[in-house]
Amino acid sequence: MLAEVVHWLQPQSGGTYVDCTLGPAGTAFNILEACAPDGRLIGIDQDPQAIELARERLQDFSSRVRLYCDNFSHVKGILGSAGLSQVNGMLFDLGVSSVQLADSRRGLSFLHEGPLNMRLNAAESPTAADLVNSLPESALANLIFTYGEERYSRRIAKAISQARVLSPLRTTTQLEAIIWGAVPAAYRHGRIHPATRTFQALRIAVNKELDILEGSLRDAIEMLAPGGRMCVISFHSLEDRIVKQVFRALSRLPSALVSILTKKPCIPSKDERQRNSRARSAKMRVVERMPLMAKGCPV
């Protein structure tokens, strides 16, 4: 949703914009082009490899870019360390990038043989292997159901529990095979692969993605200058629900901090959905920081 992000964010020369989920910097590149010649960008990503890719991609804008290898939950501290009290725009593009999914060493995809890692920051713990091998069966079922919205979570957790008694699960293909065998035959040929939701649930749990989201959004909105905008792209119904609830809560009068610009979430164009299957579930919501009166209350 590159064009949509630039449209809603409205980057201007002289402004400061924050990409809280930098990734390989494709969107950041276009934001910098749009806010030329004097706009600045702060890029945040907890993945050191993403930071290196971004630094290479943005080298022509180096004087207007500052990159931070950190989690976006620390956005207020990051901006403070950069000497910033306000910014003109924020972007959160949640989830994982195609580059990360394709890296078998991360274990994010069952399409590639790799370790059951799933950490976006290798310094963090535990790994997905730690969870599938140590969680009680009931806790594992609840995790898969809550974060993956997987209807066969109990069957999958039971199959994992039985398999790990014989040998600890170490690879993505081991886990995929167990899930395949645990679900009904008809479920194996549905719209998505039967392992998709379980892998998603484990990734979310490993990286605490939902735990940090609400607080991060609220902190980021506090850093927006009046008239500044925030775009949030989510790929998961639980993420979108949190974004929706935070935006609604902060837009309630009489003490509203933001105005919701997208009454319904924006979705990718038909052409983008055809070109990129991962875009099919994307939803973008946008808010604008309201002007403030002298006492700090919205006009």
Image (tube, grey):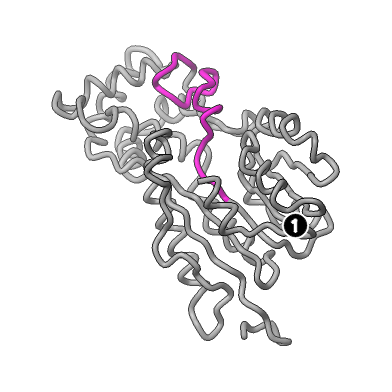
- At horizontal 68% and vertical 57% (from top left) the residue drawn is 11
- Left or right of 48 on screen, residue 176: left
Q: Is residue 129 magenta?
A: no
Q: Nearer the viewer, residue 229 or 199?
A: 229
Q: Secondary structure at mark 1?
A: strand
| Residue 292, position as x, y percentages in the image | 67, 81
- Left or right of 243 on screen, residue 195: left
Give above or below for 52 relative to 285. above
- At horizontal 71% and vertical 46% (from top left) the residue drawn is 33
Residue to which mark 1 is pinned: 16
Q: Quadrant of residue 112?
A: top left
Q: Residues within 10 Å of mark 1 (few under 14, many from 20)?
A: many
For the record, the magenta segment spans 92-114
| Residue 148, position as x, y percentages in the image | 34, 40
| Residue 54, position as x, y percentages in the image | 70, 34
**Amino acid type indicated by mark 1:** Thr
Q: Nearer the viewer, residue 178 or 257?
A: 257
- At horizontal 53% and vertical 32% (from top left) the residue drawn is 126
